Image (spheres, helix red, strand yellow):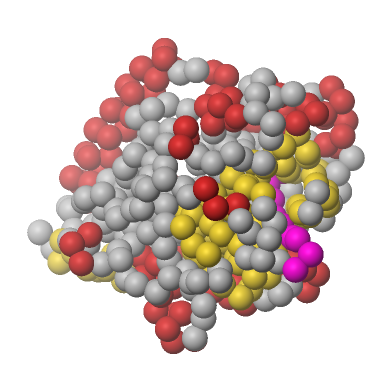
Amino acid sequence: MVFTVLRSNDHIITGHSIPMKHQYRKIVLVTVSLIALLGLSILTIDFDQFGAIPSGQDLTRVRKSENYDLQQDMFVNQEKGLMARMREEGSFWSNPQKNLKNNFFLTSNQTRPDQPLPEDNSAVPPNFNATLDTIKFAWLGHSTILLSMQGKTILIDPVFQSSAAPVSWMIKRFQPTVLDINALPEIDYILISHDHYDHLEMATIQYFRDADIKFIVPLGVSSHLKKWGVLPDKIVELDWWQTTRIGELEFICTPAKHYSGRKGMTEIQKSLWASWVVKSDDKSVYFSGDSGYGDHYKKIGDRHGPIDLVFMDSGQYNMRWQGVHNMPKQAVKAFRDIKGKHLVPVHWGMFSLAMHDWFEPPAEIYKMAIAENLSVILPVLGQRVDLKNLPLLEKWWESDLQK
């Protein structure tokens, strides 16, 4: 064995390397196994999970968007050429030796915890929606958030199944969901950022489709919901910078730097990806969805800041993916651009989609919060937080959880 230094994301880690010929042998074995699993999955997959892309009148409406490129027949990011550059940088053939090491099977990082994460799985109190003068929330892991403001309850990017993928053996959650879907309080609105499986889940949509709920989604995502049985009059679909007011709340669809697609490269970017601002007369919340850093954060902050509570994409990143996911330093910078008051890092703590240590996002942002005197909220799973009575900032991800 040769002692080596490997680069993982934005920091250096050390460990014992695997001889290159053994690395290639392992990659071949893993590839063969994955092909076999894929073949088995095709026999059992529920193809309805793919949803549907816009057609007919929905497609006509989509093609009128300024964010839809008619020549490419897809939605595009404001930063031109972003996805093409990412595909080139992420290509195995652009740097075979680097990309061979930079994968789940050879990384020395701890991408999953060895034991269940701490959680608060007590029942949601009846006064959770007593929020005429405050904002309350519970982070349920990854990007799923139970939020209440102005007396209404909003469920954001809800994922409750055992995996965030169209087949059950892929992208398994760390532990069962902290709150069973049947234990949720009455939901008024479901807010969706984009159509990836770790943000939009068919089973959850179908669970709520007959309830008295409004589904608020980016342009094009309604086609998935209608495929899964949601009636059109229950769906509000918006383009970037469009707004809808329902009762005392205003929902503003804002830009993000990401992409969409549930069925591989043949149907990529047929629906829009978005971030969201939710406002009452005197309170505001921002949810970034999935996004890389860009000038859209400052534009949103200039138009709608200051913002009381910011849920910011802060996990599942990689140096090659930073076009579509914030690195920790970028998440903090984006929080400042948004003119946020309180930061909640999300998109971590339940699924492992990247090769950084599972605890790296909160650890890195905690250090920056202390150094820069930021108001950062890092609750355990399911913990109910009231902005009028913020919890202490504790490093709960340390101790026995890191080995």
Kindly identify the residue that appears in the image at 63 percent across and 73 percent down: 340
With respect to residue 279, does 167 lie above or below? above
Q: Is residue 233 visible?
A: yes
Kindly identify the residue that appears in the image at 56 percent across and 68 percent down: 387
**Closest to the observer, 12 or 214:** 214
| Magenta region includes residue 281 | yes
Relative to 258, is 20 on the left or the right? left
**Closest to the observer, 277 or 107:** 277
Q: Is residue 355 visible?
A: no
Kindly identify the residue that appears in the image at 68 percent across and 61 percent down: 132
Question: Percent x, y for residue 136?
Answer: 56, 59
**Quadrant assignment, res 26:** top left
Q: How many marks?
A: 0
Relative to 35, is 249 on the left or the right? right
With respect to residue 382, does 298 lie above or below? below
Span shown in magenta: 271-282
**Quadrant assignment, res 224:** top right
**Quadrant assignment, res 155:** top right
Relative to 242, is 355 on the left or the right? left
With respect to residue 185, does 222 lie above or below? above
* Residue sitting at the far front: 126
**Closest to the observer, 277 or 324:** 277
Quadrant (top left/top right/bottom left/bottom right) for the N terminus? bottom left
Question: Percent x, y for residue 337?
Answer: 66, 75
Question: Percent x, y for residue 205?
Answer: 59, 30
Kindly identify the residue that appears in the image at 30 percent across and 55 percent down: 118
